[in-house]
Image: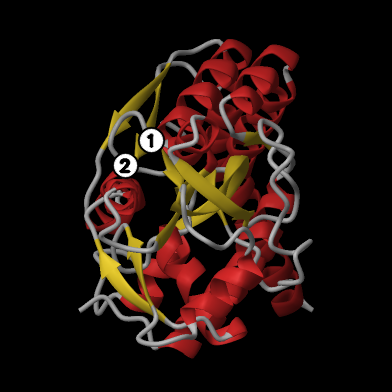
Amino acid sequence: MKLLRSRRTALACAAAAAAIAALPALAQADAWPTRPIRFVVPFSAGGANDLMARAAAEGASKRLGQPIVIENKPGGSTSLGSAVVAQSKPDGYTFLISAAGVISNSMIKKSLPYKDADLVPVAMVGLAPSVILVPADAPYNNLKEFIAASQKGVGFHWATAGTGSTPHFVSGILETKYGAKLDIVPYKSGSESITAVLGKQVEATSEASIVALPYVKSGKLKALADTWTARISAYPQLSTAVEQGFPDMQIAHWCGVHAPAGTPDAILDKLATAIDAAMKDAATASHLKDIGIEPIGGTRASFAKFVADERARLGAVVKATGMKDE
């Protein structure tokens, strides 16, 4: 009996000690934030993810009562900025503005300075559907005609923004699922890819709606399809690839927020709630939609599901194409 009592006493003491140890963390989460927050953007300033990050930062900052500072750290197909956040203290003051690379890098790169598990999903910000672009005078007007034309002769040259970029995944789906005959030409950025299409060095590319729409609306390029599941708010006359009969063509330039693993759940919940409110703000949503971005927001759970689904989608393309970043 004494031994049993001793064990019970020991267990009770251990539980009490654990509860006491957790108090500082709970108090910290309850008070958070008490100083400026940093959003690390793994892209250069001015692109789709940077613009979405700034809109999220502005809206969330108002609701959290602290400034949110944007820090651009491009390089390594987003792995440079991702590593900075993965290796940061999980105290709720450093977050990653994440994109598809946070999922696909570990699939296509030989090595990374962090593990996938070092970053956890917090909130969805928004997305910019990818738009398939061809020269304005191209003889095809939809995706079916484009694929059929590519199957003749040597095929088409397709510009990407590098291995593992969204245009690379778009081309992979077109090839492995729908039989397009494409020769990949990697460039350093989406703007270089668009320049190549304008100059007819390549037959096609795809690019985020926020970048693509000005060229389409001005008549400089022709849009064949929107690659997401819904039409673009700023250009609803463009049908989706799904509507055109290509159900597996579901990919976009998305923007979310990830945190270093170990960041208290209470902090993650607060940030997710603030970002969701920012994306549902009428003025913010209207501004983003006008420039070709679809605000999303949502809960931590909904973003975690999106990330899991995206991992499955992109993983299947990597496997089918043998995509590797040498």
Camera-near label (1 vs 2) is 1
- Percent of width and height locating residue 2: 73, 75
Tell me which corner region of the image, top left, top right, bottom left or bottom right, holds residue 44: top left
In-image side of 162 versus 238 (left or right): left
Mark 1: which secondary structure?
A: loop
In-image side of 315 versus 322 (left or right): right
- Percent of width and height locating residue 121: 57, 52
CB atoms of marks 1 and 2 within 8 Å: yes
Question: Which disc, if any, is residue 271?
Answer: none
Q: Residue at x 73, y 56 (%)?
A: 229
Viewer-proximal residue among 198 and 269: 198
Viewer-proximal residue among 202 and 323: 202
Q: Residue at x 49, y 30 (%)?
A: 218
Tag 1: residue type? Gly
Using the rendered image of the protein, determine whether residue 184 is visible from the camera's viewpoint.
yes
Mark 2: which secondary structure?
A: loop
Question: Which disc, if any, is residue 47?
Answer: 1
- Percent of width and height locating residue 324: 31, 81
